[in-house]
Amino acid sequence: MSNETTVPTPRPTTLSGWIKLLDGVPLPVPQVSHDKVCRAIADSRSSLRDIADLMQNSPALALSIIREANRHTHGSMSEPAENLEVALNRLGLKRTEELLARLPALPEGQIPPVLRQLQLISQHASQQANGFFASRLARLWQDIHWGSLLFLSPLWPLALAQPKLLEEWELRVIHKHESAHKVELELFGVRLLEICQALVEVWHLPIWVQQGYRLLISERRLLVKVLHIARDSEHPLHQQQRLDADPDLRRWLNQPANSVLLANGLALSAQYAWDSTHCLRWQHLTSLYLQMPMDNLQQQLHQQAVISARNDAAPGLWHPAEALLWPWDARRLPKGLLPAPAPTAEALGHWREQCAQLLVEPSAFRNALHLTSAACDALVACGMRRVMLLMVDRGLANLRAQQIAGLPAESANLTLRVSQSNVLQRLVTKSAQVRLNPDNNAQFSALLPPQLRGLFRGEHLLLRSLSSNGRVVMLIAADQDGGPFSEISVQAFGKTAQCIEKALHSFTNRSQ
């Protein structure tokens, strides 16, 4: 199974399209958890509480059980199951076994890291909720625990179906501070919160989860009023006076259900930095909710993060507790802002073999499609993650995609008119290379066809035209997922392009 995506599906652009896609995505369960639960169910000495305790170690398994138990409650007299033990009682052991048999069970390393990272955030949120709220609201601890663990669960199938969209959202909204509204409409066609809220309703998740999304979407005016009061954390008496002057706002703030949203806000915002504006906003809000001084809250926040990391951290995943060891103003850069890793020695060996095939004399290629397929393979071998080879027609008027790698299947039908872009006109006039980077991206992006730029989103892109017998016949577009290039891969790209150009010349003149 690929670590990039497990459900290669076209990207929807409507709310109904997203719900249909995401509701049908089966969430993989770690093999170890799956086996332990199956053994417990087969053991007549295991109680439902024992089985539920084992299931808690796998958020995906817990979600699947609760969803299945609630699937048939809509419109009936029974209330949706709010926690795992109630869900198991509803299903019974036989139906639970049948569900387990349908779920994909995989070694943890084969579960895509984007999904595992999101589930780790959910586990961190659950730990923060238990630490801050469960002892104060002891009789509601189950609601707090399951609500906080499942709050982000609508994003879990999205991490499987379209992992790159979530990574791009994080890069642009969190790290580059672009408008979330604009980015989400561009990437998803609808707001991300609307997708989450709709899935929560379809799955009949715990009512506190539904209330959290309703607050974020339709009660933002009240949230903004409370945030203004929460910022004045150095004057708790003044804060209390302002809340007392608005009893409706005070009642709204003090709802126990808000604990679920606060825990997830604390965990999610800490992913970027403990002292970011976004993180401090959630800390101030939690401080006001709990009537706890900020210093005490931050100390407990860090302690709970360490407990979460000790219990749930895994190799290859990021936990904010790691940043507590760093200088306070340090920042974790996302993959999209770090240079791509250099190709391994093994990968470079494979790349040399691919280039050697291109240079065989006389040409060993049966037809142009055979040649461009080998050319595309060589570009991927040198480290390019998204590649498109476009052939130029004899009149130098149109470019038609002939090979793609790492791009949506529908992009294989792309046709571009050369006249619509000054950059394309320059590239088809003679062999040339254009390298986009943050300094020139805005300038060149405005001069490229939107269809091409939409496929290669990001600030880094290589465009190179290749000639045969004095005429440009091919254009290569390639990048490393839009992030900064590995310079070794850029050098290998240049050498690959030279090999492809020689292969084109040899192929064109093979009859001579």
Image (cartoon, rainbow, N blue to C red):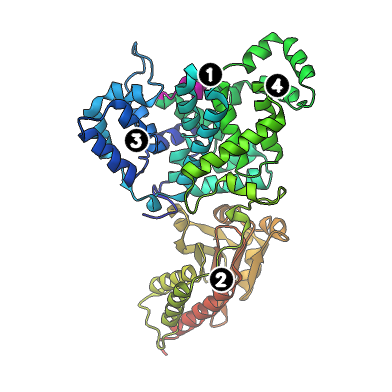
Query: Label 2 to label 4, Cα distance in Å?
Result: 50 Å
Residue 44: where, in percent of width, then height?
20, 30
- Which dot, 4 or 1, sits closer to the camera? 1
Task: Examine the rendered structure and indicate whether residue 349 appears above or below residue 383.
Answer: below
Query: Label 3 to label 1, Cα distance in Å?
Result: 24 Å
Q: Which mark is residue 137?
A: 1
Q: Is residue 73 magenta?
A: no
Q: Which mark is residue 54?
A: 3
* Viewer-side residue, 496 vs 197: 197
Q: Secondary structure at mark 4?
A: helix
Instruction: Please report whichever mark, 3 or 4, sits nearer to the chain's N-terminal start.
Output: 3
Instruction: Please report whichever mark, 3 or 1, sits nearer to the chain's N-terminal start.
Output: 3
* Amino acid type for the residue under numbered disc 1: Leu
Query: Label 3 to label 4, Cα distance in Å?
Result: 39 Å
Residue 146: where, in percent of width, then height?
45, 27
Task: Examine the rendered structure and indicate whether residue 120 appears above or below residue 454.
Answer: above
Give yes or no for contact between labels 3 and 4 (Cβ–Cβ under 8 Å): no
Q: Secondary structure at mark 2?
A: helix
Residue 117: where, in percent of width, then height?
49, 45
- Which dot, 3 or 2, sits closer to the camera? 3
Quarter of the figure with the C terminus: bottom left
Q: Which mark is residue 489?
A: 2
Task: Examine the rendered structure and indicate whether residue 503 appears above or below residue 70.
Answer: below
Q: Secondary structure at mark 3?
A: helix
Which residues make up the magenta segment?
Answer: 204-210
